[in-house]
Amino acid sequence: MKNKAAIYAMIISFFLLPTAAIAAPTLHGGTGMLESPSADVLANGKGELGLFYGREWRRQSVAVGLPGGWEIAHAWRFAEGQALQEENSVKLSLKPESVLTPGVAVGAESGGSLYGVASKFLPGGYRLHLGVGSGRFDGVFGGIEKVLNPPHFSKDKASNAQPTLRVVADFDGHGLQYGLRAVWQNGWQSQIAYGQGNWYGGVMLNW
């Protein structure tokens, strides 16, 4: 009987328990997917930096977690022949994600974009994000992530040094973006993605 209970517990854990979400900035500064926000917010006192390079543009961003489930972010966009563009955003976590229920957050971005979004881990290493908003979101937005190689710990240091790879795709209300994100040790991440008709790369740091 005890063996059956242990087996059932392992099955439930495999299918339902979420893998820890790894925060990463969007091109607009706040934590999320590629262009769209997720329900994740940085913990109080935590932060993240993002540096993204496209063919004719560069973006930089910084975000910080505050008490009470708040997150604030600022992003800069540099493009050839254009004036510097800056964006501010703020997000509030209404409910953190649990084993059975999604996380929920609301936020606002420069230009009058308001949104609400929910995020939930699914069986098989998937994570789904779905939201609705105004402004640049123009209604429904969302995305999906898939972990290709779930992290595991080994006595082999070389094995532990391998990055965790995630395929990310999102729709921000106007277009589809997709890419591959690598989560390295010590808070570093890198990505290559396609969106707005161009390929671009990025390097991110969480602390």
Image (cartoon, grey):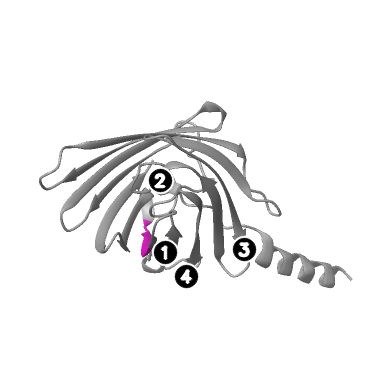
State how far apart marks 1 and 4 are (Cα): 12 Å
**Looking at the image, which residue is at 83% across and 72% down?**
4
**Looking at the image, which residue is at 17% across and 58% down?**
55
Q: Is residue 182 above or below residue 27?
A: below
State how far apart marks 2 and 3 are (Cα): 27 Å
Q: Would you say the residues marked 4 and 2 are in contact, meaning their CB atoms lie under 8 Å apart?
A: no
Q: Would you say the residues marked 2 and 3 are in contact, meaning their CB atoms lie under 8 Å apart?
A: no
**Looking at the image, which residue is at 29% across and 59% down?**
196
Residue 100 appears in view? yes
Instruction: Kindly identify the amino acid type of the residue bearing the numbered disc 4.
Output: Asn
The residue that disc 1 covers is 160
Q: Secondary structure at mark 4?
A: loop
Residue nearer the viewer, 73 or 177: 177
169 sits to left or right of 67 = left
State how far apart marks 4 and 2 are (Cα): 33 Å
Which residues fall within the magenta stretch? Answer: 177-184
8 sits to left or right of 19 = right
Question: Where residue 116 sits: x, y (%)?
Answer: 55, 42
Earlier residue among tags 4 and 3: 3
Residue 122: assigned label: 3
Q: For the residue carrying disc 4, how many other residues have a C-alpha within 10 Å: few (<14), some (14-19), or many (20+)?
A: few
Q: Would you say the residues marked 4 and 3 are in contact, meaning their CB atoms lie under 8 Å apart?
A: no
